[in-house]
Image: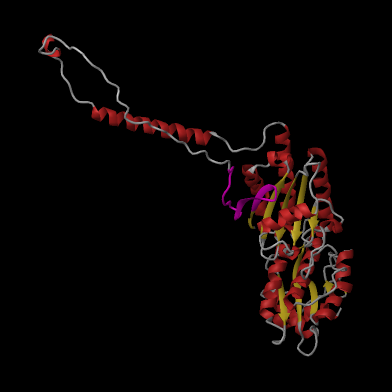
Amino acid sequence: MKRKVTALLTALLLTLTLCVPALAWTEYGAIYDETDALGSDELSNLGQYTLPQLTEALHLDLRVDIFTNEDVSEGTTAGDIATYVYKDSGYGWGEEKDGISLTLVMEPLADGSYTLAETDWCVYAMLSETRGDGQKLSGLVYDAVEPYMTARAWDGTDMTVSAEALCQAVNAMAATAADYLSADFPTEAQQPETVQSGEAPELGSTGMNYVFDLRGMLSDGEREELEDRAEDIALRRSCGIYTLFVEDFTAYGYGDDPYTALYQIYHAEGLGVGEDRNGVIIMLSMTERDYAMFVYGEWAEYAFDRYGEKQLEDRFLDKFSGGDWYAGVSSYLAACDEFLTLAEDGKPVRSSPLPAIGIAVAVSCLIAFLVCMILKGQVKSVRKGVDANVYTTAGGGLKLTDSYDHYTHTTETRRKIESDSGGGGRSSGGTVSRSGGGGHGRSGKF
């Protein structure tokens, strides 16, 4: 309750106006929710167990505060409130008051839900000089949290979606702070399936068969739904459709190339459906935003040739670039199902030959025209003779006594046979076609 009063005092000191306290509030240990609308078991575990454990392990106070703007006067920003609350509420570890807080200022709607503007949240950090740069830490945490603060998740339509986004944001804040301080910390209560501090568990240990969210980018509900959809496609189309989120793909020890790492992971984990292990897998590595796709198996490579890979990628990669992880995986699964259906009907996605034919016809016509013009220029002008004797020789006629055939030369024409690259090259997503590992695919940045 102290933080609630503190928030109200903040507005009072900043605007010199009287504030009226909100009627509902909930405190989950290190997480304070004035809206009383974002509660969940996961949020409670984060606030009562995970954040306190991390605070002890990192010697860094981790706090989350959610206020409403009902009594905040115009001109008071989320940053103003975060700064005052942190200093006035006794936040911080030790004498240097090291810590970091995530503050949200939400707007109530008539139906009892809440919305959050993209500018009404902030990250505040304090860090002693001996431990690092507090401003840099706050910037890193801000970048990690930002993908979960999109308008879609906080428009007030579904508070459950907002609650899930908040949990993901808290996880991202904690993981980023721990990574910056290079400290070991307990992660079991936080996110069992998240890869942290160089750990690289086998995919089979996650309990998932198709959607391996080792970075905690999806909520439990989203992950389970996408897992069911991927399994359904695999059963109907005899091709595994896999998604892999990792913190850093280099932690698996397969080198610094995301494509090479992905196809080695595919084979090491024994992925694929049927004897030929048909499948397609995409990997997103969050540390450097690396992306890779790998297609394996005769049936899978028929359904997704190089041109098809590029078309498939265009269906979902922009959503990942925008931080909409659920929509990205959902679009990926839908597109895979569509491409496999077309392949079963004998109409796989292929590049159209019409542009190449049109170019060939145009070039042929141009060459023929140029040849005709050259030949025409070589023909000498003639005129009709008036008398027939003009066409005869003086000796009384043309007499051929001998004839000879002289070999002069042979003309040989060669045509280069182009390989079926099928859309290779760089795409709008910053990716390029690759081969290796007994299949083919793409890699780049997202």
Of residues 18 and 389, the one drawn nearer to the viewer in this rendering: 389
Residue drawn at the location 70% of the way across and 77% of the way down: 137
Asked whether residue 237 is drawn in magenta, I would say no
Of residues 202 and 207, the one drawn nearer to the viewer in this rendering: 202
Task: Give coordinates of residue 248: x percent, y percent.
Answer: 72, 64
Residue drawn at the location 51% of the way across and 36% of the way down: 355
- Vertically, is 15 above or below 149? below
Q: Where does the N terminus fall, quadrant-wise?
A: bottom right
Residue 304 left/right relative to 426: right
Task: Give coordinates of residue 359: x percent, y percent.
Answer: 46, 36
Residue 393 left/right relative to 411: left
Of residues 178 and 423, the one drawn nearer to the viewer in this rendering: 423
The residue lying furthest to the bottom in this view is: 95
Can see residue 310? Answer: yes
Of residues 4 and 46, the one drawn nearer to the viewer in this rendering: 46
**Image-quadrant location for residue 172:** bottom right
Q: Where does the C terminus fall, quadrant-wise?
A: bottom right
- Vertically, is 422 above or below 130? above
Task: Give coordinates of residue 115: x percent, y percent.
Answer: 75, 62
Magenta stretch, residue numbers: 421-442
Asked whether residue 432 is drawn in magenta, I would say yes
Can see residue 30? Answer: no
Residue drawn at the location 77% of the way across and 50% of the way down: 242
